[in-house]
Image: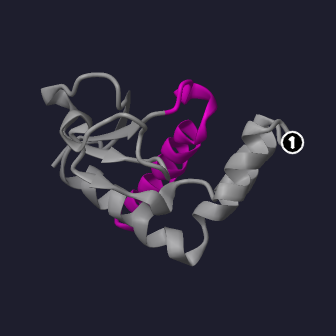
Amino acid sequence: MPSDPDFRVRRVYDPPEPADGRRVLVDRLWPRGVSKERAAVDEWLKDVTPSGDLRTAYHSGRLDFAAFRARYEEELAEPDRVAAVGRLIDLARASTVTLVTAVKDPEHSHVPVLVDHLRRRLRLRRHRHE
């Protein structure tokens, strides 16, 4: 088990590396033109991704990143998404986890919001068990 669980982020178009550990696709749609073999993901968790409406509002410019972040955080707290978030946390407690995405600009996407959310949840769980 990693002493300090954390999450790596990589694009699906980059070749996998041994240090990736468990690779989890965190996009709602399968990456266009990428075979399952090339993606080399162990799991695909659609339930940790923004809703279609939220994604569309952000990409069309109706929401800035701050508003997108706030709405996505609310979605991550919805009961049907909590189990998928918990799955990622459990995986990170057991091994390295790499969140794999096809987005062109991961730094301005749902991925850093998800990583921040997961890190906060890990800290909360750690404090509860101390």
Q: Nearer the viewer, residue 122 or 61?
A: 61
User: Could you tell me residue 33's position as x and y percent?
Assistant: 37, 34
The C terminus, quarter of image? bottom left
| Coloring applied to the structure | one colour
Q: Nearer the viewer, residue 51 or 9?
A: 51
Q: Is residue 109 magenta?
A: yes
Give the residue type at disc 1: Arg
Which residue occupies the extreme right position in the image? 62
Tell me the residue at 35%/32% (across/down). Answer: 12
Tell me the residue at 54%/50% (across/down). Answer: 117
Label 1 belongs to which residue?
62
Q: Nearer the viewer, residue 119 or 99?
A: 99
In the image, taking residue 94 as reference, residue 24 lies left or right, namely: right
Which residue occupies the extreme bottom position in the image? 79
Range covered by the magenta-colored residues:
103-130
User: Could you tell me residue 119's position as x and y percent?
Assistant: 46, 47
25, above or below 43, in the image: above
In the image, taking residue 13 as reference, residue 3 lies left or right, namely: left
In the image, taking residue 42 as reference, residue 14 lies left or right, namely: right
Q: Main secondary structure of the magenta part?
A: helix
Tell me the residue at 73%/38% (across/down). Answer: 59
Give residue 20's quadrant in the image.
top left
Q: Is residue 111 magenta?
A: yes
